[in-house]
């Protein structure tokens, strides 16, 4: 059966060099209607229901992708991307990536603790660099916090007119929201048995909601060291300057 | 074997200010002052190739491009417009080359061609070309100039120029070809017969195909007139320049090249992976 | 002395049209290729950059000429809105697939006429025109290349690869066989007709199913296409997806289009061990924007 993958030639070459072969481009998706939740006008607070929904929707998309990959006998998924597309009042969450299989037959060692394929958002190049560096990905961990930022009262607004000063209530609110998202991501990574997370990105979005409602998403790949003395690692790197921009 | 007439651009007198600016840049030997739009890396690589920047050169031409009458239902080239657009670009190029010649340059790198419309003049188009003139450090001008003795021109960046020389080719000239084409309006009968149907429209396929072919053919013809061996980085652009939507200009542009003697073997490609992606 | 302007040389328009009708390439294009083939000192043209040229010249790939293929197609969109059942818009799917394959076929004919082995650096563009809303055009532009010292093939191979990618692919033990394409248009006039103001959150099963079916159909066609060429795999797959909902008299109409495109490859029998890449640290600075 022919493999399909959205890997570039560089990526294909390196994934093969790391001892894997691509099987198929796998996808998972779910369409969700996001309703709304009431939040007190002048309070900094998390919108817990919406947070949970966003986590649940992304997890559903990822689970469907992993189920598809497992069905194909994959040991992992590289280059996984999480996207959301709003169309009208409905939102689609998609996960897409390339399912890969270990060529040397020791694939079971690369799967996660439930025997499911590993997932990561690393490109083929990064995947190769990580594996030859002595680590293996476990799972893509993500955490979400949807936060309502308080509207200012007239008194607050009046007292700060013309003054240059920090607004501690906002600093604190956004700080808290990011912390919550990262904490959830870390907890997810720990549950999957990862000892560290690489490539963490914290993104913000408001997805067409009211401007005081902001979503913070933290995404990263949980990794563990490879406990195998025979595993081949990198030679020392050389220095180079490229002529091309 | 066909005989191709050599390309000779008419000399274009330069405005007084241009002459003064260029004289300022020339200065007495050893005190040359140059301007260029090179990035630091381009600058280093152009020098690495044995060239020095001589100065930023420009040419422009404001051209009145009218409309050409044509039957609504015809797929046809608008030759008057094609030639007008072509001639205007030639004028701008010739002025830029004139500036380069005044600087004693052997070539022009990073040539960019722009067509602008101004709100104050309907059916006026301004053609601007801009590039950095360079000269060979070893003074062997004849080795680098185009067969006609003019400075070479090219739309390659400094990096691409360096790479081209490494691969055993040298640029000859910026070559272009164009074709302004009128796409037929469909008659009511034609429109009606294809309502609700999915089918290829061969008359349009053929028309647009022909227009692109003509632009490509003219580009190749220019390269042949210059005695070049090949063309790199060929591109075809499509633009309407604010005309009626049925009138489209197809514009092909690239750099013609000639093989040259290499002092060292071209670099062998290697598989390397950058640690930072 | 004005520069010699190359006038259009007339061809037999009716004959040219008949060739296009039959899926061929117009006579003007055929003439250009014929003249290139027969002229002893033809200028080669290519879309390649100088760095790709270095890779090409060092690896035995010779650029012959820029090649092109296009097809202008009439699409009867009107059929769609009258549909009251959900399902694939097969007419639309076939129209887009046919227009794409006609453009690719013409490019392949051009390359084969030049006795090229492959077409690299193919850029594929689909567009509509201001002058006719119900017409689409697909244009494919690439560079025909020849492999030094190899006999001319029966047919040129189309690829979405750059020259250096073709070389790397060869080193990795593969060779391209075709550009594989699969597509699907789907329309559902009543798709989870939830209201915008609904406070309830939850999955929309009909949307999810429509999206998955569209994908399955496109993937199936894509794999069939690759399988037809005996491919062992498809690399560099691009997925283009357009989906939108719109509300009409209280109903949610859902339309989705999916196109997958990639280069089908086969494993070479004579492939040795691929070279081991070197690890390097790039000392480049990131580009500094002029105005941040």
Image (cartoon, coloured by chain):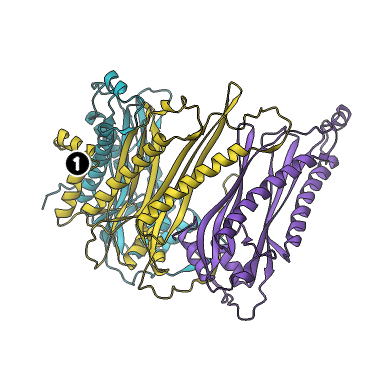
**Position in image of residue A233 (x %, y %):** 59, 76
What hue represents chain C? yellow
Instruction: Please give the name of the residue rendered at 21% of the width and 44% of the height, measured from the top-left corner.
Output: C29
Viewer can see residue A127: yes
Q: Nearer the viewer, residue C237 or C80?
A: C80
Viewer can see residue B99: no
Query: Quick check: A51 left or right of B228?
Result: right
Q: Nearer the viewer, residue B57 or C104?
A: C104
What hue represents chain A? purple
Instruction: Please give the name of the residue rendered at 79% of the width and 44% of the height, measured from the top-left corner.
Output: A174
**Position in image of residue B250 (x %, y %):** 31, 37
Query: Quick check: A133 left or right of C68?
Result: right
Q: Nearer the viewer, residue B35 or B167?
A: B167
**Position in image of residue C12 (x %, y %):** 13, 35
Q: Residues within 10 Å of mark 1 (few under 14, many from 20)?
A: many
What hue represents chain B? cyan
The C terminus of chain C is located in which quarter? top right
Instruction: Please give the name of the residue rendered at 31% of the width and 38% of the height, measured from the top-left corner.
Output: C71
Q: Nearer the viewer, residue C276 or C87?
A: C87
**Which residue has dot 1 on it?**
C28
Query: Quick check: C54 left or right of A40?
Result: left
């Amino acid at each position: 059966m022919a493999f399909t993958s959205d890997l570039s030639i560089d990526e294909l070459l390196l994934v093969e060099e790391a001892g894997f072969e691509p099987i198929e481009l796998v996808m998972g998706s779910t369409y969700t209607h996001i309703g709304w939740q009431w939040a007190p006008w002048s309070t900094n607070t998390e919108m817990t229901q919406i947070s949970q929904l966003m986590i649940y929707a992304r997890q559903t998309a990822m689970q469907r992708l992993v189920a598809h990959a497992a069905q194909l006998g994959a040991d992992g998924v590289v280059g996984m991307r999480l996207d959301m597309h709003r169309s009208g009042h409905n939102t689609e969450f998609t996960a897409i990536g390339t399912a890969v299989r270990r060529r040397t037959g020791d694939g079971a060692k690369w799967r996660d603790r439930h025997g499911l394929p590993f997932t990561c958002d690393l490109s083929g190049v990064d995947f190769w660099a990580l594996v030859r560096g002595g680590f293996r990905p476990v799972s893509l961990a993500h955490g979400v916090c949807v936060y309502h930022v308080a509207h200012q009262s007239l008194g607050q607004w009046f007292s700060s007119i013309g003054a240059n000063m920090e607004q501690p209530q906002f600093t604190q609110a956004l700080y808290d929201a990011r912390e919550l998202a990262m904490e959830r991501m870390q907890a997810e990574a720990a549950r999957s048995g990862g000892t560290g997370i690489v490539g963490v990105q914290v993104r913000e979005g408001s997805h067409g909601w009211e401007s005081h409602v902001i979503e913070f998403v933290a995404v990263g790949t949980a990794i563990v060291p490879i406990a195998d003395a025979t595993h081949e690692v990198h030679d020392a790197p050389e220095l180079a300057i490229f002529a091309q921009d | 074997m066909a005989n191709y007439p050599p390309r000779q651009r008419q000399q274009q007198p330069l405005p007084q200010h241009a002459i003064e600016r260029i004289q300022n840049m020339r200065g007495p030997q050893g005190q040359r002052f140059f301007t260029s739009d090179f990035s630091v890396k381009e600058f280093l690589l152009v020098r690495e190739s044995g060239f020095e920047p001589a100065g930023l050169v420009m040419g422009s031409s404001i051209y009145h491009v009218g409309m050409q009458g044509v039957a609504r239902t015809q797929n046809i080239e608008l030759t008057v417009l094609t030639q007008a657009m072509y001639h205007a670009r030639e004028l701008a190029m010739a002025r830029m080359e004139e500036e380069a010649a005044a600087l004693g340059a052997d070539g022009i790198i990073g040539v960019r061609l722009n067509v602008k419309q101004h709100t104050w003049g309907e059916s006026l188009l301004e053609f601007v070309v801009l590039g950095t003139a360079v000269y060979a450090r070893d003074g062997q001008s004849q080795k680098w100039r185009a067969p006609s003795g003019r400075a070479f021109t090219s739309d390659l960046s400094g990096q691409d120029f360096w790479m081209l020389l490494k691969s055993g080719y040298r640029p000859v000239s910026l070559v272009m070809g164009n074709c302004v084409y009128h796409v037929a309006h469909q008659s009511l009968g034609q429109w009606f017969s294809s309502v609700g149907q999915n089918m290829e429209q061969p008359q349009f396929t053929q028309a647009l195909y022909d227009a692109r072919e003509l632009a490509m053919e003219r580009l190749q013809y220019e390269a042949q007139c210059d005695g070049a061996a090949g063309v790199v980085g060929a591109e075809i652009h499509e633009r309407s320049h604010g005309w009626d939507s049925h009138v489209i200009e197809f514009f092909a542009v690239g750099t013609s090249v000639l093989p040259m003697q290499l002092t060292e073997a071209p670099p062998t490609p290697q598989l390397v992976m950058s640690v930072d992606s | 002395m004005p520069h010699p302007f190359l006038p259009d040389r007339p061809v037999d328009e009716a004959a040219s049209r008949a060739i296009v009708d039959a899926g061929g390439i117009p006579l003007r294009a055929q003439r250009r290729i014929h003249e290139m083939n027969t002229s002893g000192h033809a200028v080669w043209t290519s879309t390649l950059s100088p760095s790709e040229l270095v890779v090409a010249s060092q690896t035995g790939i010779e650029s012959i000429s820029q090649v092109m293929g296009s097809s202008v197609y009439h699409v009867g969109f009107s059929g769609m809105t009258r549909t009251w059942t959900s399902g694939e818009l097969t007419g639309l799917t076939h129209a887009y697939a046919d227009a794409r394959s006609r453009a690719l076929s013409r490019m392949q004919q051009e390359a084969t006429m030049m006795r090229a082995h492959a077409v690299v650096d193919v850029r594929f563009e689909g567009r509509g025109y201001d002058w006719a809303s119900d017409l689409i055009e697909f244009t494919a532009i690439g560079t025909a290349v020849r492999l030094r010292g190899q006999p001319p093939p029966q047919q040129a191979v189309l690829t979405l690869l750059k020259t250096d990618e073709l070389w790397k692919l060869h080193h990795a033990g593969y060779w391209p066989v075709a550009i594989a394409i699969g597509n699907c248009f789907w329309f559902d006039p009543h798709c989870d007709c939830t209201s915008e103001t609904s406070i309830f959150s939850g999955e929309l099963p009909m949307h999810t199913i429509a999206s998955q079916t569209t994908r399955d159909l496109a993937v199936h066609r894509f794999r069939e296409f690759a399988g037809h060429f005996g491919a062992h795999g498809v690399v560099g797959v691009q997925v283009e997806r357009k989906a939108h909902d719109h509300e009409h008299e209280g109903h949610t109409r859902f339309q989705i289009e999916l196109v997958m495109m990639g280069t089908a490859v086969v494993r070479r029998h004579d492939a040795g061990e691929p070279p081991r890449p070197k690890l390097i640290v790039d000392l480049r600075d990131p580009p500094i924007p002029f105005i941040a």
